[in-house]
Amino acid sequence: MLENDTLPRVLYVDLTKRRIWHEYRPDIFEHTIGGTGAGIRLLQEECPEGADPLGPENPIILTVGPMTGLFPMASKTVAMFKSPHTGNLGESHSGGRSATSIRLSGYGAVVIRGASESPVFIAVHNNQAYIRDASALWGMHSSFTVGRIIRDYEPDAGIRTIMRIGIAGERMVSYACVSMESYRHFGRLGLGAVFGSKKLKALVFAGKHSIPVSNRKDYLKIYDNIFQSALDKPTKKYRELGTSENILPLNELGSLPTRNLKQTRFENAHNISGEKFAEDYLGRRVACAHCPVGCIHLAALRQPYKDEPYFYKTSMIPYDYEPIYALGSMLGMPDIPDLLKLIDIVETYGLDCMSTGVILAWATEAFEKGIISEKETDGVKLTWGDYRCYMKAVENIIEQPNEFYKALAKGVDHASSIYGGSDYALSYGSNEMSGYHTGPAAHIGYFTGARHSHLDNAGYSVDQKTLIKEKVSPQDLAKMLLKEEQWRQILSSLVVCYFARGVYTPEVVIDALKISGFDLTQDDLNQIGIKTLVEKNKFKFREGFKPEEMRIPRRILETLSPTGYLDEDYIKETIRCYMEAVLIEPEPALPNPV
Amino acid sequence: MRRLAILDNEKCVGCQCCMFACARRTGQGGLAESRIGIRSEGGIEHGFVVIVCRACEQPQCCKVCPTDALVPKRTGGVAYNPDKCIGCQLCVKACPIGSVFWDAEIKKPMICIACGFCVKYCPCSVIALENIPEKELSEV
């Protein structure tokens, strides 16, 4: 790490005591690089054992990496906290302008402690941090409106991020998200509820510091190579149709979870495909800061007002593979306009779209099977494909008019533990399923991944590339998933977007890190990756993680995947092998810091 | 005259790679040295605006400079002499486009020199270096 780099400066904000200060923490960054590695160390320092996720003792930690603001696509911020949704490790990543703004405001990490008695937001402009009154913003339902008001109120347009919560965060729905730059999110695991518990409505960072480099000539050369490959083939699909390109291939393969995974092919897939979106609704493509790919796709939806002829509103609504899966195929949504209306309300209130979709899919099946009735749903007739009933249900998750919606606001694991139907409650370690029923590796990945996310170890990719063709022993599959998750710790310590994983090969990472003064070998990187994953799992076990007790939803065994029917014993054995290996610490010791 | 032309800001995806390129031109990371700005047009859903010196014929920044640190160049754009600059920021306030940037680290103004370094890093061909024959200048 270079001496005059601001990366190791950590901003501390104590909302209870209303104190702001910073500390110089090279000890954290030297051994972990930054991002997720730095985040888990700070979480271990800050979060006491058994902390109430919605209590003042639960910290919010945000970290960026050395390459943020230096190289393209190193534009993610890692959030670490104890999740109110799973009661365990909460880690979520987001882009937008969050990472560059934090880094260029002069910090590598932010720690928020305590809780405020009255609503506040935090604004940081070039090293100067302020706690501001947010009483006028509290109670606002729409995360878009909160963003618009702060946009006009705070300076530094163009070089800032505005992270904020909607009403879901205020009401502490356990899967409320934090939105930024309108369309990017700390989506999963309920950071929005943690914001809400602290009466923290928003967080603004702005800055345009410079970042030192070790060698100017090498910097320009390495930059150009990375920039060029960022525009080449590996990122083409993200740039053009975006992640929604996956709808048709996964449907064709029989992997697109449909109607609560009763099916894996959706008869209306063509009506909600990436191709259809692009043809009829794509209104604008936008990018995160310092990313030439521009994967963010916004649909333009024109809707007439019923009470006034020739009067319309046009909304720009984001779409990606995951919301199309969770709020589309999972709910049997027949076409794009209906789906967009549902995405819009979920975005507006600030809920995680994936958890929301899976929860509504479970509720619809439970309603269909008669284990719940209109008494529980407060008169809402949950019906596949009917966006009106789902919009009403989303409103009820916010308003919580009865015990049933209170339960839905805590996730599908919780709701099914009360009302039954756990066989088809699709969650893993209490986190709702991602959109891939590709085979056993995807599901084992959800169980074993530190965040129970498909992005932890890309099991869906192992299914499609390997398991569809050949059998792999539980030991070998565990090794494959573990190796990928260990390497991804490096990418997310650098805060490189996973869409750039084909660009940032180990060789490229080693060269780029030299520019920031980190002189590391491939072996050093591997060890840092392993160590980071060990630390995360140590935190999870400390907080009561019991992999052997995780519920395997029967539905995943009953619905055919492209690799055949899934075998429960194989899943359990692979999870066992994975968990046995994941806590083994690397030898030899960590490299000496530069 | 040479200047940076904005071909179509509707194509801008807001990646800000031009801003980072401009700063990198000086051999640094970050944005302190950047002389081009990209911000949303009142929310990302409305697209982006590109803020950069348009090399006006009678630059307002030069008119208000009390020390002649900024003077119009015969070939277009403005010439800046840091030795004469007293850091009063009148030029920053005078430019209605907002294209006189401020280097907060050394307290001096920064204006695009139309070097074109940023152009090759724009993935959407929003900006280009433009040569305008002098006789056409008054029509621009």
Image (spheres, rainbow, N blue to C red):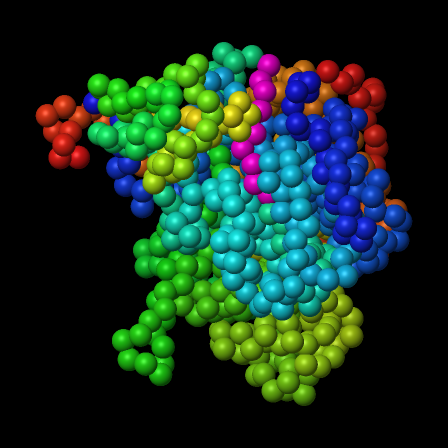
Camera-nearest residue between B60 and B135: B60
A505 vs A467: above or below = above
Q: Judge whether residue A210 is colored magenta.
A: yes
Instruction: Write down the quadrant of residue A519 in the picture.
Output: top right
Q: How many marks?
A: 0
Camera-nearest residue between A231 and B126: B126
Judged by its main secondary structure, the magenta piece is loop
Task: Pick the quarter of the image with the N terminus of chain A.
Answer: top right
Instruction: Write down the quadrant of residue A56 in the picture.
Output: bottom right
Rendered residue at 28%/80% (across/down): A309
Residue A543: % across, % down? 86, 50
* Residue A88 makes an appearance in the image: no
Give the left or right position of residue B124, taking residue A334 as reference: left
Task: Pick the quarter of the image with the C terminus of chain A.
Answer: top right
* Residue A408 makes an appearance in the image: yes
Rendered residue at 32%/81% (across/down): A308
Query: Which region is colored magenta?
Result: A205-214
Residue A544: % across, % down? 87, 52
A66 vs A187: above or below = above
